[in-house]
Amino acid sequence: MGYLLFVTLIQAFSFSLIGEYLAGHVDSYFAVLVRVVLAGLVFIPLTRWRSVEPAFMRGMLLIGALQFGVTYVCLYLSFRVLTVPEVLLFTILTPLHVTLIEDALNRRFNPWALVAALVAVAGAAVIRYDRINPDFFMGFLLLQLANFTYAAGQVLYKHLVARHPSDLPHYRRFGYFYLGALAVALPAFLLFGKQNFLPEAPLQWGVLVFLGLVSTALGLYWWNKGACLVNGGTLAVMNNLHVPVGLLINLLIWNQHEELGRLFLGGSVILMAVWISRLGIRRPLAAH
């Protein structure tokens, strides 16, 4: 639990740092690439290359590509059309994606998850009902893809570690994660990056270094390690704890003039969607 709480605080600050200092000023693909390179420089020298099962290596490459590569490319792109509070609220749907993925892996079907998805869309519409446009919906869809790949990474990592136990510490096998992320981030920057939107101010470089070494290196490592130590219900709650903390930080420091009424109403509808998604989950009967 301690790992997850610490990462929650890091995430809460990170969203505002991205939205206030990088979005619209620094190329999104470059920012993602710098983060993964810095994190890789921390973990790859510590990685054990021998006596690690090839299946585990392949799994970690896939998880890194999903949970960081695809997730953070989509996240950074969403900041082009959404405010920081909107991004935070839309990430509250990660537990819904965790439920969908767990159901798929266990060959279950929960119709309530589909109802929850529709309710979540309604909640998003409430937040921007007078300014709904294709860009807004594109931002919402980008974040749902980010939520899905982030959730997939967590679920798959938990299953992978359980399937391939090892006496090695987690950090000795975590470097593969960042190689998988690099396999997405580097081609994305080479294909779509804009060289004229690289960081110029020292503050922008400082934010990137913090995001790379703290949020990405320590944050993702501790989050995945912590996810293996708690049950699914606790993980779902922790996935959403960064939302109120992040909103509080952003609204107090940067966005004092944000329309709180619609944020609260739309956020409540989205939160209800998360609750609806839990309705069809079967809980084990208590032992007598």
Image (cartoon, helix red, strand yellow):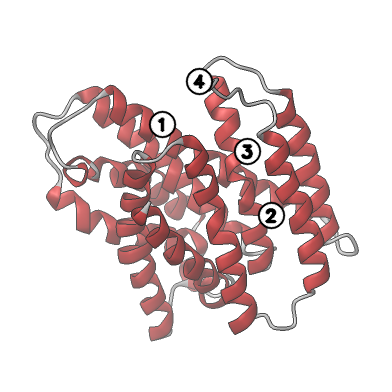
Please, what is the three-letter code of the amino acid marked with disc 4? Leu
Q: Nearer the viewer, residue 239 or 230?
A: 230
Q: Secondary structure at mark 3?
A: helix
Do the residues bearing badges 3 and 2 touch, measured as CB atoms within 8 Å?
Answer: no
> Left or right of 51: which side holds 71?
right
Which residue does the numbered mark 3 point to in the structure image? 96
Label 3 Cα crowd, 10 Å radius (few <14 / some 14-19 / many 20+): many
What residue type is disc 2 on? Gly
For the residues labelled 1 and 4, the Cα–Cα distance comes to 10 Å
Task: Indicate the position of residue 163 as horizontal and vertical percent values.
Answer: 29, 22
Q: Residue at x 53, y 66 (%)?
A: 15
Q: How far separated are the C-alphas under marks 4 and 3?
A: 14 Å
Provide the secondary structure element on which disc 2 rests. Answer: helix
* 3D distance between C-alphas at marks 3 and 1: 16 Å
Q: Please determine whether, in this image, residue 269 is positioned above or below residue 154.
A: below
Q: Badge 2 is on which residue?
A: 139
Q: Alpha-carbon distance for marks 2 and 4?
A: 28 Å
Q: Which residue is mark 4?
A: 105
Residue located 12% across and 33% down the image: 167
| Amino acid type at mark 3 | Leu
Mark found first going from the N terminus, 2 or 1: 2
Q: Position of residue 284 (x, y in %)?
A: 53, 21
On the question of residue 217 being in view, the answer is yes
Tag nearer the camera, 2 or 4: 4
Q: Position of residue 31 (x, y in %)?
A: 44, 64
Residue 136 visible somewhere in the drawing? no
Q: Which mark is residue 156?
A: 1
